[in-house]
Image: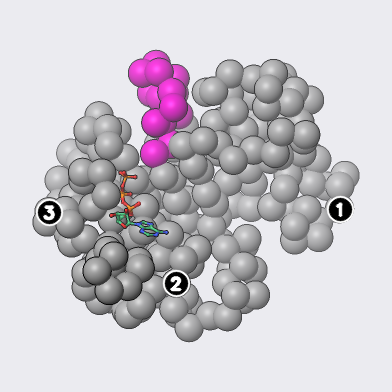
Amino acid sequence: MIRIQGLTKTFGAGEAATRALKQVSFEIKKGETVSVTGPSGCGKTTLLHLMAGIEQMDEGEVWIGDMPIHRLKERELSRFRLQKMGFVFQSYHLVPVLCAWENAALPLMAQGVRRKEAKERALEALKRVGLADRANRYPSELSGGQNQRVAIARAIIGEPLILWADEPTGALDTDTAEQVIGLLDMLNHHYGTTIVIVTHDPQIASRTHRTIRMQNGRIVHDGGVRS
Ligand SMILES: Nc1ncnc2c1ncn2[C@@H]1O[C@H](COP(=O)(O)OP(=O)(O)OP(=O)(O)O)[C@@H](O)[C@H]1O
């Protein structure tokens, strides 16, 4: 369902150039959970950004189903992202002046869904992540784990095909991290969401179907299917 072919990305030029990705190719099946691991600076986030069409590649192809991400114009890409993808980041990326349900509802509002319907669906998404009773709280009134759950509610509100997560538990303590990972597992089981997680944490990597290990802009290991 996700097919990456010869993905290459260099930042900067001349002496200052960093070859962040070097001819990376692999496929991810629908419904698979994949962790991307490796040392700091090896290219994990760059890979995620290129696959999600957040950043432009120098060379290569990214196919999601039959959609050539590498050929889409920015506007088509934005629409595709809004409709088919959800994002979770280490630092949550919530809007501080919006309460939990308004944050969760953002992707729907961006697609022109009316406020009343968006609110109903946001409350439903917050319920799924166990935060129905915090719907009117602002990010500053919630814990890190709760904010990350709001971010997950926002990521899943449009029932995306793919959820991209970049160090989703990086700012959380072990127990809270465990809850967040449990939630991602649940999403995968119940909704068949394909999940790609960039993580430093071997514990999290061991919970995904498959682990891709990167080093210096290349894949050096791909396997470890969960029993
Ligand atoms: N916008 C940018 N401009 C210049 N260099 C960049 C940029 N983004 C990333 N890089 C470089 O590309 C390489 C890969 O970065 P990337 O963020 O993908 O690594 P990573 O594996 O996600 O690292 P970390 O685990 O520390 O987050 C690094 O050497 C980084 O310094």
Residue 70 as seen in the image, left or right of residue 121 = left
Q: Tell me which corner region of the image, top left, top right, bottom left or bottom right, holds residue 111.
A: bottom right
Asked whether mark 2 and ligand 1 are closer than 8 Å, the reply comes as no
Residue 135: within the magenta? no
Mark sitting earlier along the chain (3/2): 2
Mark sitting earlier along the chain (2/1): 2
For residue 152, the mark is none
Name the residue tied to disc 1.
Answer: 114
Q: Percent position (x, y) of residue 151? A: 59, 38
Name the residue tied to disc 2.
Answer: 56
Rendered position, 36 above or below 100: below
Q: Secondary structure at mark 3?
A: strand
The magenta stretch is 167-182
Q: Percent position (x, y) of residue 190? A: 47, 42
Name the residue tied to disc 3.
Answer: 221
Q: Amino acid at mark 2?
A: Gln
Q: Is residue 66 visible?
A: no
The residue furthest bottom is 71
* CA gap, disc 2 and disc 1: 32 Å
Q: Amino acid at mark 3?
A: His
Please identify, in this view, whether the residue under mark 3 or under mark 1 is nearer the observer: 3
Q: What is the quadrant of the C terminus in the image?
A: top left
**Which residue: 34% across, 45% down?**
198
